[in-house]
Amino acid sequence: NHTALTGRTAVVTGAASGIGAETARRLAANGARVALLARRADRLKDLAAEIEAGGGTALAVAVDVTDQDSVDAGAARIRAELGRVDLVVNAAGVMLPNPLDDGRIDEWTRMIDTNVTGALRIIRAFTADLVAAAAAGGTADLVDVSSIGAHVTFPNYAVYGATKAALTHLSASLRSELGPRDVRVTNIEPGLTDTELGSHIDNAALGEAGQLGTMFDTIGALSPTDVADLIVYTTSRPRHVNLRHLVILPTHQA
Ligand code: NDP
């Protein structure tokens, strides 16, 4: 159904690659107008051009979710150019595993500021839009991309897992505030997915040439499309139906 989301206006963070980029493509293919947010402006421009060439509407907005001024400026531009937003996908994230006793406060800060506070900055910027869209009779969605790492423990992933547990809890708590106002909140927890996420790991033994690569080899991975399809599905349900918590794993992942 190529019109399931016609009339909707979406913001997708993390749209420069992976799950966010594919989600933006799929939302646009289903009729939504999409604002593309991430730091790499060149990637966003290319994706916006691709979406527009396919007949969709996309706006590339370079935003660093760890920078409040950047989020404020991005939100103002989105409102000016696309109007009220009724679909928000928080997919920006970083995963930087290391032994806790390495004490990498630089990595901890980056993960917390991106995965938790970054999501909060986006929620802060667009909640009023979501509530207004729902009050006007429309459908309104907040989708947070967490991780199965919110529940499963892996050595070296304590801080990443903690940020995702925080995001999962945040989604559940927010739902109790926004659900009564007809804004749906959906938390999605993917398992291993084939994206750029592992490329920033600063530890050869844990990275794509090490432990993470071995995981891909042994259990396989979801494609970003698998997750994006789920986001299209949940956001295109009738407005009284809220899939609140979705876990999606490669079949071989325990
Ligand atoms: P990618 O690395 O491909 O995508 C992450 C995106 O986040 C990029 O577009 C990146 O763009 C953006 N981003 C990172 N930091 C910032 C920032 N400060 N401000 C704005 N955007 C930022 O990985 P995935 O697609 O896998 O990751 C998407 C989400 O899915 C993440 O939250 C991740 O934790 C989650 N996830 C991924 C899994 C996997 O196995 N891949 C499993 C479970 C959850 P740019 O660098 O240009 O800013």
Image: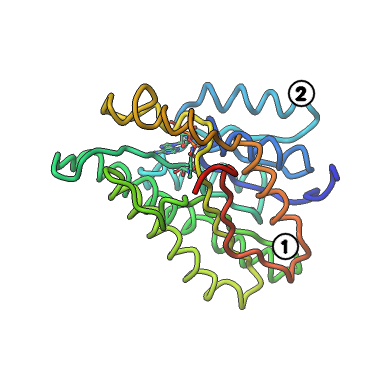
Q: Residue furthest bottom?
A: 180
**Crowdedness near tag 2: few (<14), some (14–19) or many (≥20) residues, C-alpha within 10 Å:** few
Q: Taking 197 as reference, is 209 above or below it?
A: above
Q: Earlier in the sequence, mark 2 or mark 1?
A: 2
Name the residue rendered at 64%, 59% in the picture. Answer: 141
On residue 155, the disc is none
Name the residue rendered at 77%, 37% in the picture. Answer: 29
| Image quarter hosting the N terminus | top right
Name the residue rendered at 57%, 62% in the picture. Answer: 245
SS label for mark 1: loop
Coordinates of residue 216 in the picture (x, y in percent)? 48, 31
In the rendered image, which residue does mark 1 sit on? Answer: 139
Q: How many marks?
A: 2
On residue 53, the disc is 2
- The part of the image, by quadrant, that contains residue 227 is top right
145, 57: nearer the viewer = 145
Coordinates of residue 121 in the picture (x, y in percent)? 42, 53
Q: Taking 172 as reference, is 167 above or below it?
A: above
SS label for mark 2: helix
Q: Taking 74 as reference, is 148 above or below it?
A: below
Q: Are marks 2 and 1 in contact (CB under 8 Å)?
A: no
- The part of the image, by quadrant, that contains residue 215 is top left
Give the residue type at disc 2.
Ala
Q: Is mark 2 within 8 Å of ligand 1?
A: no
Distance from the alpha carbon under mark 2 to that under mark 1: 27 Å
Give the residue type at disc 1.
Thr
Coordinates of residue 40 in the picture (x, y in percent)? 47, 27
